[in-house]
Each structure stands twice: as structure tokens, then as C-alpha cells.
Amino acid sequence: MMTAMTRRLLFALRRSIAVKLTLTLVGFVAYVWLLRNAPTSLVATYAYVNPVIAVALGAVFLGEEITGQMLVAGAVIIGSVALIVRKSGEALEPGRGLRRRAIPVLEGDLQGK
């Protein structure tokens, strides 16, 4: 026979698992969509920014300490990602991360030959 506390614990555990699975699925779908619709070099920047966001959330919600070294590292990461985004610009083809090349058009192609 389960006690009320055990039932609440199981309910909380099931709810936590459901939320985690849902958020994981949403994140994965968003990542795959980005891979198809944005330059690969820009999509890959999430791997650099993600730890900075995790540290900030830990400080806000869990009261974790942020040191000066962490602030400098975070600034370097954010600055690096800003450079990547700035340099990538419109010259990249979505989903490929390759520079677009002009396709040579032959005069015969224009006349349907």
C-alpha cells in the first residue's frame, strides 16, 4: 500500500520525466530545422553559447556563484560567437555552410538549345 508521500513522489517523478522528454523533443526538432534552414556554421554556435546560458541560469535559479574568471570566459565566448555570426553573413547557403557560387549560364541555355 502506497502512502500519500510516495504517491506525490511518483507523480512528481512522472511529471518531471514528461517535461524533460517534451523539452528534449522540442529542442531536437528545432535543431534539425535549423540545420536545414540556416548555415551550419551558425547552427554550431549553440554548442558554445549553451554553457554560458547554463551558468547564468544556475546563478539566477540556484544561487550559484559566478567568479571573475567565469565572466571573462563568458565574454570571450559571446564575443567569438558574435564574430562568427558577423563573418558568416549572407554569403552562406542555408543548411550547408558553404559559400554560394554563381552558376555560369551559357547562351545556348538561354535560347533553349
Image (spheres, grey):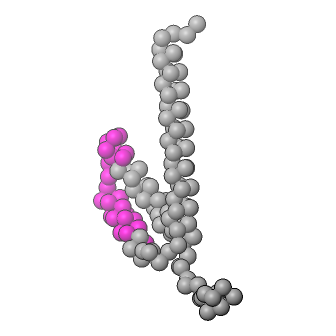
Question: Considering only vertical position in the picture, is 94 above or below 50?
Answer: below
Quarter holding residue 1:
top right
Residue drawn at x 51%, y 16% is 6
Percent position (x, y) of residue 75? 33, 64
User: Most prominent secondary structure in the magenta stretch?
Assistant: helix
Percent position (x, y) of residue 60? 31, 44
Q: Is residue 58 visible?
A: yes
Percent position (x, y) of residue 86? 39, 74
Closer to us: 56 or 110: 110
Q: Is residue 76 visible?
A: no
Percent position (x, y) of residue 64? 34, 45
Per the image, is 63 magenta? Answer: yes
Q: Does residue 57 appear left or right of residue 4 in this picture?
A: left
Q: What span is colored magenta in the figure?
A: 57-84
Q: Quadrant of the C terminus?
A: bottom right
Considering every residue shown, the one lying at the far right of the view is: 113
Residue drawn at x 50%, y 21% is 11
Question: Considering only vertical position in the picture, is 55 above or below 105?
Answer: above
